[in-house]
Amino acid sequence: MCLAIPAEILEINGDEATADFGGVRRKIITTLIEDIKVGDYVIVHTGYAISKLTKKEAVESLELWDEVFEIINKDLNK
């Protein structure tokens, strides 16, 4: 199974960017997408930005991830 996570672009430096994954910052590669700007939302898979999202799409996706993590945490704490 592959996971792709939404993130907000915070900084851009050449073909790399710093992205925010809900409070966690990581460097990602941006060569697969043209015209990325600070403030854009992207889907990241294995450290590569693979597509752009609207802010609304990113927020909806992050809310679903929060629900998944809440369920996992409940199961782990049984």
Image (cartoon, rainbow, N blue to C red):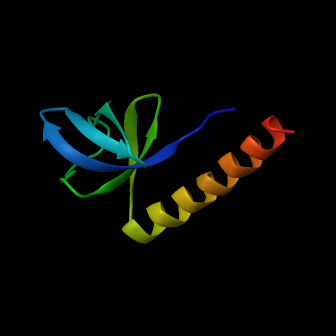
- Given residues 36 and 26, the one toward you in this image is 26
Height in image: 14 above or below 64?
above
Residue 47: give x, y in percent of width and height.
40, 29
Residue appearing at x 29%, y 45% in the figure = 33
| Near-viewer residue (57 or 62) | 62
Q: Name the image quarter holding the N terminus.
A: top right
Which residue is at the far front? 77
Q: How many marks?
A: 0
Image quadrant in which you'd find residue 21: top left
Q: Farthest residue toward the right?
A: 78
| Residue 42 position within the rendered picture, expressed as x and y whole percent measured from the top left | 37, 51
- Is residue 70 toward the left or the right of residue 3 in the image? right
Residue shown at 66% from the left, 46% from the top: 69
Residue at x 78%, y 46% (from the top left corner): 74
Q: Residue furthest bottom?
A: 56
* Residue at 60% from the left image edge and 52% from the top image edge: 65
Left/right placement of residue 50 relative to residue 67 reads left
Picture quarter with the C terminus: top right
Q: Residue furthest left?
A: 14
| Depicted 58 relative to depicted 50: above or below | below
Q: Where is residue 7 in the image (x, y as percent from the top left)?
A: 39, 48
Q: Residue 40 occupies which quadrant of the picture? A: bottom left
Taking the image as shown, residue 3 lies to the left or right of residue 45, namely: right
